[in-house]
Image (cartoon, helix red, strand yellow):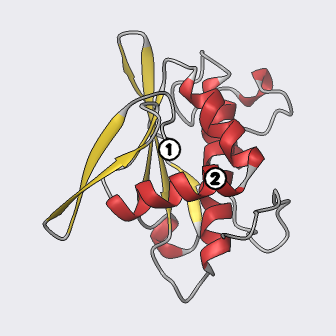
Amino acid sequence: MVLNGTTVRAVDHGASVQTTTPRSVRSTDAVMLRLIEEGTERSVTFAALVDTIGHSNDIVYVEFGYCAFGHLDGCLLPFVASSQGGRYLRVLVTPDQNRRTHDQLLALIGHGLQHALAVIQHHDVVNAEHDGRDMPDGSERRWWASRDTKHRRRAPLATPS
């Protein structure tokens, strides 16, 4: 499957794995690249998020990592790096398999992409200190991290064939 026609290589324990993903949604981890591709195949909402981000000038890296010293299952880091014509954002999701199922991991990635898209749609946001009054609901802190993973609205995932 080719999304926006860009191929990205990632290294997973020394083995080179070639995966296709849009150039605006990236990872340095081969497993994460496969998860992004699976989410895109299984969920229309996930695919729309990836496609919309793909049409922006910003780059979103999605990686395994810990947010708030492991107290959160996922977050959009509050550090936004600017470059010529775009910004770099970073989404982290927990690598702890005891805290979530495979489908919950896909939902966490999608939720992180929703946060990234919210920032992408506001070109004046460059860090977590941005004045939230300019945001649609005035609550930018929720865009950077979310504690409640059990009650979050989730888009349906198609069962893999």
Q: Is residue 128 left or right of residue 139?
A: left
Q: Nearer the viewer, residue 55 or 4?
A: 4
Q: Is residue 113 left or right of residue 148?
A: left
* Picture layout, residue 137 above or below residue 41: above
**Amino acid tagged 1:** Met
Mark 1 Cα within 10 Å, few/some/many (few <14, many 20+)? few
The residues tagged by marks 1 and 2 sit, at their Cα atoms, a distance apart of 9 Å
* Picture layout, residue 126 above or below residue 156: above
- The mark that comes first in sequence, 1 or 2, is 1
Q: Residue at x 62, y 32 (%)?
A: 51
Q: Of all residues shown, which one is farthest toward the top?
A: 85
Q: Residue at x 67, y 72 (%)?
A: 104
> How far from the left and from the top, in percent, is residue 146?
69, 59
Disc 1: which residue: 1
Disc 2: which residue: 41
> How far from the left and from the top, in percent, is residue 37?
52, 52
Label 2: which secondary element = helix
Q: Is residue 64 visible?
A: no
> How far from the left and from the top, in percent, is residue 129?
57, 33
Q: Of all residues shown, which one is farthest toward the bottom?
A: 98
Label 1: which secondary element = loop
Q: Nearer the viewer, residue 47 or 135?
A: 47
Quadrant location of residue 72? bottom right
> How far from the left and from the top, in percent, is residue 8?
31, 41
Q: Quadrant of the C terminus?
A: bottom right
Mark whose residue sits in front, 1 or 2:
1
* Picture layout, residue 130 above or below residue 154: above
Q: Is residue 40 left or right of residue 26?
A: right
* Picture layout, residue 150 above or below residue 10: below
Q: Is residue 148 left or right of residue 35?
A: right
Q: Of all residues shown, which one is farthest toward the left?
A: 14
